[in-house]
Image: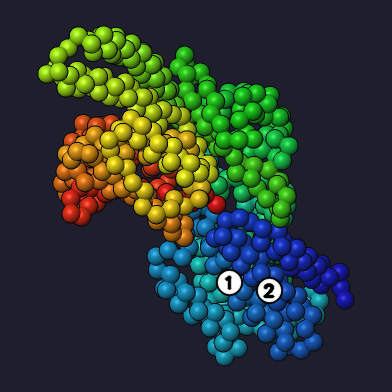
Amino acid sequence: MTRLLVAHALLFVVTALVCLAGIPRARKIQHAGTREGLLGLLVSVTIWAGGYVGYLFAPTIEWKLGFYILGSVFAFVAVGAWLYFCAAYTGRPPRNAPYRTTAVGAFLALAALKITNPLHELYFTATWATNPFPHLAITHQPLYWISLGITYVISGIGFFMLFEQFHHTGADTRPLLGLAGLTAIPAVVTVFSDELHDVLPLMYEPPGVALFAIGTLFVYNQRFEAIRSTADTDSPAIFLDRDDHILDYNEAAQAIFPALDGSIGSHIDAVRPALAGALPEQDVITVTENGTERAYEVSHTPFMAGEMETGKLVTITDVTERESYRQQLEAKTEQLETLNRVVRHDIRNDMAVVQGWADSLENHIDPAGEDALERVINKSDHVIELTDILADVVESVAGTGETAVEPTELARILETELAAVRESHSTAEIRVSGPIPAVSVQANEMLSSVFGNILENAVRHSDENPAAVEISCTEQAETVRVRFADTGPGVPDNQKEEIFGKGEKGLESPGSGIGLYLVHTLVEQFGGEVWVEDNDPKGAVFIVELRKAN
């Protein structure tokens, strides 16, 4: 066995082993299309190189021919896998590519011509030779050069996709450009193999693919993944290792943080401490650019090797308009809360004076004026009550964040409000039909405002004397319904939605004022529902459905 034969064999054996070693790593690539394409490339190149090894060492001419044809067929498979990989990596879904059926048909036709070459010899001819060592000499025919030209055109399209992608990111892609270039260099040997002394006329691209696989999967894996992640966005991005040291960044990130220039290998804290502080949780930082303050949201996507984080892609999104709106909203909310406190204070003080005057008139008025005085006192009580409702409305509407919901005892809240309305409306007939379930619901102490406002609304708007309200509860698997049935004038169908202040009219909708608007707002925040139906034979039924607490 000559050293030249061993050299040829080692070249393809090592290539196959390297590609096999890269398969487990390639399976960990997060992006499905990129993973499928690279796996297909590695497997096909492994078989391609293995076919050439079999061609060199097979014991008979028939076996040598068979292995050579196997290698040449999978060389064409590898080209298809390369194009699939490049398309997926650069954001062009291969499964949506045009002319897919035509491409598959052309591939099958060329593969059939290669397999049937012993019959027509349009692809190559084979003769036994002893120089530079005993081997089956391959002489390429026109069909080989045509198919080789096609494969190079297809491979060139893939290279164009990659180079365009590398340029688009604005990151330092020189290492990946170098790896892609190495993949193409063996093509020179392939084209001139017939003219080179001591070189068999084979296709020598497999070692280039092996070098590309080693580089992208083991040396520059994080940068390789990060560039694909930023393919479809112009957002500023910084690539960090697992210890938050800077591996790379794109031009858009450097435009915001000039300190990134020359920072490769430095900790992110050296660029801007606030940026480092925003990494643990998605946070917003402010940056002054040309005298103007802008807000950026910092988020990151981890790169994983199994269950271990190997690095992260930090994405920086301009949220200046959103933050400006949030600050304006907070300022208006604070103004609303201040106005609420001032107005409530002034109204309650003035109404206390009115009530004092009314009380002083009680012993100085004749029987004919007693009814009018009682109306004045009731109305002043109602105005003071409205200020309490207004406070609840402001708290529910202007509160920051989500409403805190917790298990709340239904019976305790409902019985307390029933006692309060019976005390303030002693002549009203407030009846409870059936037991109140001893369950907790998803709500909070503001549930008292829901029940209190519905009860007050039913009594105040009753056109019967005395007013009558019947309360009943229905327990279901996951919810509880509380029904408030009155015998008042009822609610017309065209007002059943508007009475809660729903729709465009809001608080100006017809109905009973802000009390029912508050009811709807609170119940919605609790995750429940409230609606009104007709009572039989007259009146309305207000139904509050609340979720049971787990």
Q: How is the image coloured?
A: rainbow
The mark found on residue 77 in the picture is 1
Disc with the residue nearer the chain's start (1 vs 2): 2
Q: Which residue is mark 2?
A: 47
Helix, strand, or loop for circle 2? helix
Q: Residue at x 70, y 35 (%)?
A: 244
The mark found on residue 454 in the picture is none
| Contact flag, marks 1 and 2 (Cβ < 8 Å) | yes
Q: Residue at x 68, y 50 (%)?
A: 304
Front one among 237 and 16: 237
Left or right for 310, reference 335:
right
Q: Residue at x 16, y 43 (%)?
A: 489
Which amino acid does the dot numbered 1 rest on? Val
Which amino acid does the dot numbered 2 rest on? Ile
Can the viewer see residue 108?
Answer: yes
Q: Residue at x 51, y 50 (%)?
A: 439
Quadrant housing residue 183: bottom right
Front one among 312 and 149: 312
Vertical order, 154 against 323 (above or below): below
